[in-house]
Image (spheres, rainbow, N blue to C red):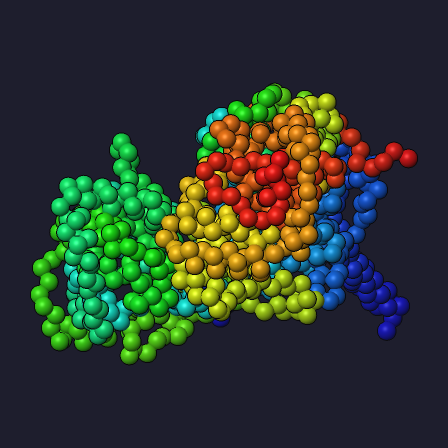
Amino acid sequence: MTAEEMGKVSRRLRVSFAIASVAFVAVLAVSPVKDYFEEWKRYEKDYVRFAQTRPDTKHLLADFHTGIDQIWLPDMKVVDRCTTCHQGITQASLADSSVPQPFRAHPVIPHAAKEWGCAVCHRGQGPATEVAEAHETTLAWEQPILPTKYIQASCGSCHRGDIPQTPQLNRGRQLLSELNCAGCHRMQGIERPAMLGPDLTNVGNKVTREWIYKWLKEPHVVVDASGNTVVDGYETEEEPRMPQFRLSDQEITALSAYLSSLKSHPFEAYKFDPRVVADLATKPDLAELGQERFRQMFCTTCHSLAVTRGDETKLIGGYIGPELTKVASKVNPDWLTTWLRDPQSYLTHALMPRYQWSDEDLYKVTQYINQKLADPDLLSSVPQLETPTPEDIEFGQRLFQEKGCGSCHVIEGVSPQKDFGPDLSSLGGKNVSQLEFGSANIPRNIVAYIQAKITDPLSVNTAARMPQYRLTSADLDAITTALLSMTGNPSTSGLERLIVPQPRAEFRTAGAFGAVYERYKCYVCHRFNGFGGDLAPDLSFEGSRSQRQWTIDFLKNPQTLRPTLTFRMPQFNMSDQEAATIADYLGMVSQSQFVSVAGENLKQFGSEKAVMGKQLYEVKYQCQNCHTIGSSGGYVGPNLSNAGNWLNAAWIEQWLKNPQALVPGAIEPHRTFTDAEVEALTAYVLTLKQSGQPKATTAAAAAGGAQ
Amino acid sequence: MNWRALILISAVSAIVTLQACHDKGGIAKTDPLLKAYDVELDANDPQRVIPLNYQQAQGKRVFSNTCVWCHAEATPAGPSNRSNVTPTPPLFTDGETLNPLSDEFLQNTITLGGEAMGKSTMMPPWGQTLRQDEIRALVAYIRAVAQPPYQPAARPASQYPVK
């Protein structure tokens, strides 16, 4: 090889070496360049620039450091890098809504982000450092950010019982239980009650085939206030619990034939005393007398009636029992009388109390219902139905099983269905790939999926057996929130420790009180030690509050203590013996640990104390702004006109010292009275007695009355 | 051979593009109001909807349990107790009265009562009934619904103590 050749080669070599070097440097540079243009770095720079426009720049930048910021909670498996871009979440001065995202402060919530991370509540991909990856569904991560509108669902994943901070979630849970979703679906925290729909074993004795036909065809019209479609039952607050199923006329004919043939246990019609009937039947205003009694007994605390004022028809009354505007056109009159006398003989789980009826009252009220709460045109749109043929009955029986009626309704001899619909107890935590979207033209996310399944089940699955619900958009969102909260069992032991279980309480007693308690169904409205309804006052500490004689008088003739209340305690016509049993039981058992009735009630209050108390009441503390005595005063608190006969001295004292210790959430402000002021106010309140009220028997009241 | 490769490449890229577009379509459009924790209708203008954040919504909850009785025209039970009280308590939306008062003053008035702050003795102290975070939430709620709207001070005071 000549030297010339050598030079040629080396030049070629040198050129290729140079190219290779440049290429090598370029390849090496890719990574730092890519790193330099990372999305999160841009947000960090923006944050620094933004902080410089704020008045408290120094403090904002003191908390800032460059680089990826991470919340790492090993026992909860939380690795959240959200604060890399969301720099301001703990800066109180950035709470204003004018601060641009992602820098705005997180609203103050009971849980600090540093202890919990972000994705625990907001979902999304915590470790991601790109906007799209963190927030949206990606191939690697299937949990997108939960829209803020449904954020209460995350509270519900740990707080399995209702908390006051989450009204939307609580409403959703309430709807899931009221709409009987538990009939077909298994859900987290929603118990299946003993009775969902009524037992249909004897329904043929109660209603006609025509009524069943109409009810199945358009349930919202039958319970409708006016008998025609003026008021849509679903749009009033009192949604009928029976949803509308997609049934053909032929199927409805068969089902009505089957159900109306169910008459296995005939009832015996009640025989009124002929003297009472003879006496009352001739009265021209019999229906009005019955209506008066109906009102006096406060049936409308549980049942609603349609009332037309002007052009507007509204349902007025409670929602515990069914709406009664047209009930006489629904039920057999003999059945009605038997039911009123003893509801549990027809339906073991009925919530209706067993009233103590005199023949006179029963006759008046049933006559009122039969004459006034009826509409002869109610069933006019129902086609002529022949006597049921055996084929119809057999077809109806098969449909009853196929359509899932047995999930809510019991029929003796028909085996109940279990888990008819899909299990929803971990629906809220499902990934997008686990959801069957079918042919539905909806966004691929869980919120859209849940809402499509509820509003239009057929759009997702053409063979769906789910009935049609018509919910307002607020209710739909509430139900969506509740379903999203059902994320199944927690994935880590760290999360499992955080679960706040649903409080469970059961209050059943035996003996004489137990019998009265069950008979009058006290727990439907009142709460005892955490168990029961919330329509009426909690009676857990009633024995500490009220004097025995007052309780007996109240039970015999309940008059309201708070004039602005719409729902009042019904008059059960209970006997003296029953009222005394309740008063004695409450006095013995329903005691607060903070009130020692026995000792305090013996205290003597001098008359000068009461005079001082009156001064404090009227001048210094001006209690009359909220409480009424006689005919004047405010109506936020209860009427105190008869407080001397009503309240125990020890209760008043403790109430003045700390009302919330006795009734959590009481409106009365907890103030700091001196002990002398407490005694004076108690002495004064005990002197408040209404004439015509029977004299109280407790020692304290006797002492108060002596002044 | 080349043609086949070209078709294959273009088909694959078309599928990838379509898939990408499809995924984009899957992201639900967000309505700004839906981002709010809770909303409330303006008392004076029912057309206007006020979005509330978490703290303001908690304030609304406390308000409708405790304060609504004397500071609103309508209450959950129907009539208001406002007319029974002299001097008449300001309505909760009354921005003209409440906007000039500082957050600290309102919090102190709720906590210690009207008398302690030189206001009406009719306002009881709530410091032992409500928690401090509930009282702060109440002030945040009152600010959100004020009419005319509340304008925070131009330069917020530092949240850190002066050294």
> Which quadrant is the N terminus of chain A positioned in?
bottom right
Residue at 65% across, 54% down:
A598
Q: Residue furthest front?
A: A706
Residue A179 in picture, x, y percent from top left: 39, 58
Q: Residue furthest right?
A: B163
Residue at 68% across, 39% down:
A605
Residue A692 in picture, x, y percent from top left: 45, 38
Question: What is the quadrant of residue B95 in the picture?
Answer: top right
Q: How many marks?
A: 0
Asked if residue A672 is positioned above or below residue A376 in the image, the reply reads above
Residue A98 in picture, x, y percent from top left: 64, 34
Residue at 19% across, 62% down:
A271
Asked if residue A174 is positioned above or below residue B92 in the image, the reply reads below
Residue at 79% across, 39% down:
A60
> Which quadrant is the C terminus of chain A positioned in?
top right
- Front residue of A320 and B61: A320
- Front residue of A589 and A407: A589
Whether residue A479 can be seen here: no
- Front residue of A434 and B122: B122
Q: Is residue B118 left or right of residue A166?
A: right
Q: Is residue A78 left or right of residue A632?
A: right
Residue A440 in picture, x, y percent from top left: 38, 59
- Front residue of B134 and A649: A649
Q: Is residue A495 left or right of residue B91?
A: right
Whether residue A6 can be seen here: yes
